[in-house]
Amino acid sequence: MRQADLDALLEAVQRGDLAPSAARERLVMEPYADLGFARLDTQRELRQGAPEAVLAEGKTPAEVRAIVAVALDRGAGSVLVTRTSAAVLAVLAEDLPDLQQHERARCAWVVRTPPERRGRVAMLSAGTSDGGVLHEARIRAELLGCEVSVHEDVGVAGLHRLAPALPAVGAADCVLVAAGMDGALASVVGGIASVPVIGVPTSAGYGSADGGNTALNAMLASCAAGLAVVGIDDGFGGGTVAALIARATGRATA
Amino acid sequence: MRQADLDALLEAVQRGDLAPSAARERLVMEPYADLGFARLDTQRELRQGAPEAVLAEGKTPAEVRAIVAVALDRGAGSVLVTRTSAAVLAVLAEDLPDLQQHERARCAWVVRTPPERRGRVAMLSAGTSDGGVLHEARIRAELLGCEVSVHEDVGVAGLHRLAPALPAVGAADCVLVAAGMDGALASVVGGIASVPVIGVPTSAGYGSADGGNTALNAMLASCAAGLAVVGIDDGFGGGTVAALIARATGRATA
Amino acid sequence: MRQADLDALLEAVQRGDLAPSAARERLVMEPYADLGFARLDTQRELRQGAPEAVLAEGKTPAEVRAIVAVALDRGAGSVLVTRTSAAVLAVLAEDLPDLQQHERARCAWVVRTPPERRGRVAMLSAGTSDGGVLHEARIRAELLGCEVSVHEDVGVAGLHRLAPALPAVGAADCVLVAAGMDGALASVVGGIASVPVIGVPTSAGYGSADGGNTALNAMLASCAAGLAVVGIDDGFGGGTVAALIARATGRATA
Amino acid sequence: MRQADLDALLEAVQRGDLAPSAARERLVMEPYADLGFARLDTQRELRQGAPEAVLAEGKTPAEVRAIVAVALDRGAGSVLVTRTSAAVLAVLAEDLPDLQQHERARCAWVVRTPPERRGRVAMLSAGTSDGGVLHEARIRAELLGCEVSVHEDVGVAGLHRLAPALPAVGAADCVLVAAGMDGALASVVGGIASVPVIGVPTSAGYGSADGGNTALNAMLASCAAGLAVVGIDDGFGGGTVAALIARATGRATA
Amino acid sequence: MRQADLDALLEAVQRGDLAPSAARERLVMEPYADLGFARLDTQRELRQGAPEAVLAEGKTPAEVRAIVAVALDRGAGSVLVTRTSAAVLAVLAEDLPDLQQHERARCAWVVRTPPERRGRVAMLSAGTSDGGVLHEARIRAELLGCEVSVHEDVGVAGLHRLAPALPAVGAADCVLVAAGMDGALASVVGGIASVPVIGVPTSAGYGSADGGNTALNAMLASCAAGLAVVGIDDGFGGGTVAALIARATGRATA
Amino acid sequence: MRQADLDALLEAVQRGDLAPSAARERLVMEPYADLGFARLDTQRELRQGAPEAVLAEGKTPAEVRAIVAVALDRGAGSVLVTRTSAAVLAVLAEDLPDLQQHERARCAWVVRTPPERRGRVAMLSAGTSDGGVLHEARIRAELLGCEVSVHEDVGVAGLHRLAPALPAVGAADCVLVAAGMDGALASVVGGIASVPVIGVPTSAGYGSADGGNTALNAMLASCAAGLAVVGIDDGFGGGTVAALIARATGRATA
Amino acid sequence: MRQADLDALLEAVQRGDLAPSAARERLVMEPYADLGFARLDTQRELRQGAPEAVLAEGKTPAEVRAIVAVALDRGAGSVLVTRTSAAVLAVLAEDLPDLQQHERARCAWVVRTPPERRGRVAMLSAGTSDGGVLHEARIRAELLGCEVSVHEDVGVAGLHRLAPALPAVGAADCVLVAAGMDGALASVVGGIASVPVIGVPTSAGYGSADGGNTALNAMLASCAAGLAVVGIDDGFGGGTVAALIARATGRATA
Amino acid sequence: MRQADLDALLEAVQRGDLAPSAARERLVMEPYADLGFARLDTQRELRQGAPEAVLAEGKTPAEVRAIVAVALDRGAGSVLVTRTSAAVLAVLAEDLPDLQQHERARCAWVVRTPPERRGRVAMLSAGTSDGGVLHEARIRAELLGCEVSVHEDVGVAGLHRLAPALPAVGAADCVLVAAGMDGALASVVGGIASVPVIGVPTSAGYGSADGGNTALNAMLASCAAGLAVVGIDDGFGGGTVAALIARATGRATA
């Protein structure tokens, strides 16, 4: 479905030539774009409230480029590419003058239709090395319309550093904590916040940090009962869940 | 703080003899009951919106009895005891004529002040063996005021069984999926629901199910981006997060 | 045994100078070619219905070249080299003008005698990143004479994408599913198909995907009872089993 | 759907009052029996060629009894209960005078309509301790109509013991190997058989046998390319896959 | 060496008939008592500053009884038996009217010569279920002469409960933290204390707590740089290290 | 082959009616006894120099009894049953007045023809809890004709206890070390002995001892280059390897 | 807080215009420097007796440079950067003419105010490959004021090499052992020393050494009761704990 | 001790000026060469019958060069360097015109005094990729004086390839099997050989081969009772044990 087709469809609805329910059905009937090596789920946003993103890892730059082109062609409001490489960034930049990117987060994105702004998320990291994952989560949540406040390097080895972040924690509709190593920040915040806390274990650290498994297991075994967890280094998934919660809960923001 | 004390305190507020802020401070100042072997966090509900529960496992029946007694004495609206044994149930039943219990969920509880009813959670299990965990989550969420619909044994080996649960999934403010073995139901539901999905991996199954780790890892590695996970067999934690989300999001229910 | 020897042998059979059983015995008597660093099992096809392939990983390009040369010299109908590197491809291309290759599958092969065509296999992948493993399986099965239909990127995060593949699943003599991460597609297909399903876990994904172990364990723990599994990333093994099943079961195809 | 309903339905078809396709649709439309705590997939056999069985582990005896009763009531040709306990056997024996059972395999079953007999499976075990799993597989495959030959305790520590089983391996449409510890028998048989080999790792052994994981991993890592594997101790799953292959491939047997 | 022998030896030193160095050599020359099934290291205290204890697990009650008898016979100032069973306690109580015991800690001990009192240790537990391990550590440290203050159930889910323990942490020569599940209390205390912190991971909890491995790894991966760790549930080892540090560092106490 | 048959066979050889080579061939031709549930490898001693033993675990008492009876009936010089239970011991004792047993080693055995005595093995354990495994190894090696010296509880926590064992280590043809926990004794002895050292990791200990895996891995990772290892708790295997080495190397002993 | 501010503050104290307690409070009130991507805990030394160090891994060279600059600007007595890369070293060397470094230890540091010298630590390594970790520990402990004696390559495969290190072990206030592979040196030293022993497992070795986990687990499972452990390759943490113990215990050194 | 010193010492013995026992004592008294970063165990051969080798991995080329120089200077009969890199080979080749090397085995060595030739070892590998480990073992055993026969690529996927190696297995004093993946060859050979079999698991293979752990565990869990195992990829260790056994057992060879 090209943009023109979509416009025609919507105009027909406007003119009263097409019932809204019939239009919705047509949209839902063509639910993906088949590229051969990939099937882009073009109506995930309609179905789930958040558009599919493109995981660049494990795909060639040409494949990423093609998927992004199709998504935009089909009228996506924004497209987010995660875990990018230099090669992927290069081909995307050729096509897209409005491409934005964040190096540490390994993300690139374009926004064609800004999202409705609703919900507040407070995002905290235990250490500087968790920054890439934290910012991936932030970018995702912002693309979904949330207002995000970021508080980096507030881990429990110097607990007093957490204090300035507490007002933001108190004002948020959802809190996200990215932490590697012992992951203890998630437990501590989970014992303070009155809203759901999403833990994102990171692979920061070496040796006994075990590639993020130690932080993951610590978060899962935590007594803090309002804490739920996503996969290791999965800033994208964490940002999505946090945004879904905050958008449903929160007030519209400026 | 005994109930009479609490009444006196609140009456002083009502009479205007005590500012609300001063009263709140006093309540927060005495934040736990020290039993020697345990410190009951009596104001967790004030701070986090959900009262502390009593994990019976690893405690003697006498310890559980004492903690429950103190909690009720301090005016708790309800007390939930999880992972009970026959011995624990016996001593609790002696003290509490209004004790309720659920055998498969290994839970016992009393309700002295019914919670405000708000928010809807749909809870699904993949198989009959996941029932204990599912009902622990249900009981917790109901005690937190949510309306819960339960759909058992709808795992992906017979995917058509899931169909009758879909309307409830569509109407819910949050969805919870309890599944052991391959945990695939969480991925499938996570690809359908437009609200956050909380996965609770269970230790059902044998051999390669690996005590719940297979389901846990599968849920964490899932592509379904609105899915967050709690610890293995942690129905209590899952029910808490789901209820926090649903209460914040949802409308009041009858 | 050189090709001329083989021809002489077979002509003797044709002339009636040698009983077929005697000829077969001679062939079976010389069951491998000793290259010093390797012993090529030249009669695996006679014994097992599928020729040995050459795993390039862990061998020098010169060793791979020598093994391929001997296999062709001994009259192999086709030779498949798996997990190739650029260096291996370079030396093979020097010797073999009819070399075919597939980059993502890391395979190279020559066909000197096309196989009898028999049996249908439907092959599905959960995501684009599983493509390398999927195509390794496809190439193997095609070299064993099967007709293969390929359906990529139909994972459960957008389950509707699976629908167009269902007719092929219904028509197949065997189904193969390549999936990493949560491996849930294998469970879902295993709950639908009426023929055996071969699961091939892949190492696609990061963090909690754990290099393919999560998908592997999920497939093994699945309730779908017609599902059997091969090793992580073992497209070759999966393609072989699927082809053995489909050839035994299936009708000859064009 | 009660048996009388089924009879009425089929009589309507016979009379020509109902088209077969319409009847089939009705059957498929009511695809499970809802018992509250379980949803029996009553048409799995129609859909997948093999009926659902009842895993007794994790269910109360009363639940197992109810599920079996419903399955028979709905006209199941046979019902198999796996991983039984003494308590489960006791309640089943009360209801079912024709109940059969196998102690080591922990199985119980009734046959109301014998299956069509088709296909041959050779089943081998490495040691006596693998016998429970082997016989679970045998019972399942026989209930699916296969002719099974059993060869116990033929592990590689005394490889000559395998010799008498080779003719049966050669005559089979599919081979199943149950082995714990090093699982090496599956590799050896996988290097000999010309039909697919299904490996069933067992938890026999102690220490480094690691509850079956060593055998599982060894089978998965095997070079024998016609070998596929099911979960640890999953005789039921192994028997199902083996029977599906053998039935599709094989000739009808007496 | 019987007590009388020891007295005679020391009296000879006192009289000047034996040089102290010669006496010390004799003591060191007979360094263990051979019981056949065990060799009691009777001079570990001389060599390492802390006597050997008797791990009852893995020994028969008769063996434990014999070892304790020999230790006392050789003049041990105290004997500590850890991980006792009811059977072990029964036989010890027969012999030793002055036997003391602690049920939750699974310890029994006799003191014949009270140790010199020196050094202060603050011991904290995250939850009530960690109490057994905590008290094993306490008993060991007290038998080594330390003054121990105990603070139970001060885990991070309700961090304010930790506050009353902070003065004791500030006054201690060494701090010990026993915690299961996420082990986060050790990280938090390790970020506050100015003396070494010994973490003792416990096996309290279920599921993702993984028998103490999660707490262990979290403590090892912690950023808190003054934190060292002993084995899971090893209250004895933790108490020993803490006491060695506190005794060397601390002042004599009343 | 019954004993009478064997006698007849050997008498024929003696009389010159049968060539020794022909007799040997006949013996080798009937290489196992088929009991249905088990195939006793009756000529493992002829082939490998050590008779098969009976692992009782995983077999019913009746099965063990039958296997032992057949082995003796076929003329075994001795039969060893390992990992016995009380039930197994009871049925064996009924049949065999000359049954010997060792409780801690969980072994039972009969000797009908004493072995030729050859070779010396020194066996050491790190702690009393390793005694069961050590004595299983000792019994096996003695039944294979070795002279064994035993040195228990000489672990590295009190290294001086090792000293009295060093002469035996120096005089042995092979050394065996049974150790759990850190397994360090094997490394230390492996750095001292001039003959091969066989390490047997044991499951003694708790927590971080990880059921013997820690000791196993430590032995495998040891720098001591003359050290080889058998499976966890596998006293039988360790005793066999040690005896094979000592018998080949050693002098005949009294 | 800039250096001038600090000077002004201290001068106010000197003049009597500000009470020392008030000054101390102000210092403690501003407890970190916020760099956006990092919050440097500038008063960790005040609070814990050891300054925060900079873990270069996971940070960009520019970030490391900025953190070091701020730390020195705030008056740090010394700054230690661990796990440096060539790029980090290059930017640091530009700014800091007095930068010192150790290649194998991957450390760089500057000292502006030498620490008070107090306490003795003996540090031993099992093999040459453990040297990097050992020297990281040494540098840290020296920067904290300890006198360190180093004894490399004294592992148990040649135990006599340990002998020359024993006098230093006997004279130390704390002993640190860095060992990979089997980690047995820590157990042996732990059985000899009368002061606390800190084990630092290293990732030296391959295969069964398992990246340091084997050494870690062996140290944790050791019977040597005065032994505590830090994370794999964590020379920094080990050096910190050892120095805290030695400084508290020890005498001032030249 | 320089070579001249050694000569002088031995000449004094020859002249009768020094008793052999006194000379031996002097040699044992100076048991290592201290290079600061390493302590070369110069008398390991005297003590253990096999000289220390130099593991190049984890050492700088300069360190390896220095150790080799010292070893030769001290009169070593041969020096073996394992796990070499190109850089190590380059510096060694500069110093040593008689340096030999084997690329796949990553070994380099010089022989100054050929060993006494005694004992026969048969060495088998399962696949070509195991060749590096196999040849490391061969080189080590040859340097210790054994006659080694090599049989590569005889794994169980084509068991008939093993047949030609059986005579060598039958003639050997010890057998060594290098195998990755399923490691099944060790079990099969262990069930055939009458002498001890040393298994060397290798990291060949991918996915479920798990870096050699699968082969390791399979060998440890094998029923073949004459089989002992060394660490993953530890050809050096395997070659040493095999040679110690073969030399003690075997006859002198040409």
Image (spheres, coloured by chain):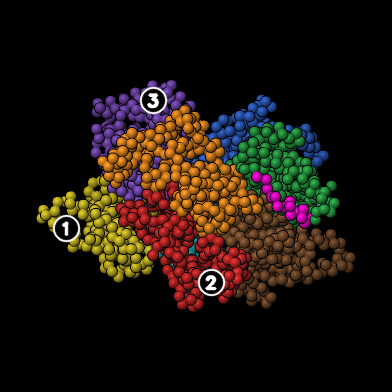
Chain colours: A cyan, B blue, C yellow, D purple, E green, F orange, G brown, H red
Which mark is on residue H75? 2
Mark 1 and mark 2 residues within 8 Å of each other at the beta carbon:
no
Using the image as rendered, state which of residue B117 and residue A234 is in the foreground.
Answer: A234
- Callout 1 amino acid: Leu
Q: Is residue C239 visible?
A: no
Write down the residue under mark 1: C9
Q: Residue at x 41, y 28 (%)?
A: D68
Quarter of the N terminus of chain E within the rendering: top right
Label 2 SS: loop
Q: Is residue F37 left or right of residue C73?
A: right
Between tags 1 and 3, which lies in front? Answer: 1
- The span from disc 1 to disc 2 (Cα, nearest Å) is 63 Å
Element type where label 1 sits in the image = helix
- Alpha-carbon neighbours of circle 1 within 10 Å: few (<14), some, or many (≥20)? some
Q: Is residue D148 above or below residue A145?
A: above
Q: Is residue E19 left or right of residue E231?
A: right
Q: Is residue B108 above or below residue C164?
A: above
Q: Nearer the viewer, residue H176 or G151?
A: H176
Q: Report the mark closest to the observer, 1 or 2.
A: 2
Q: Chain of mark 1?
A: C
Question: Where is mark 3, residue-wise?
Answer: D99
Q: Which residues are magenta?
A: E20-34
Q: Nearer the viewer, residue B128 or B122?
A: B128
Question: Could you tell me residue G147's position as x and y percent?
Answer: 73, 66
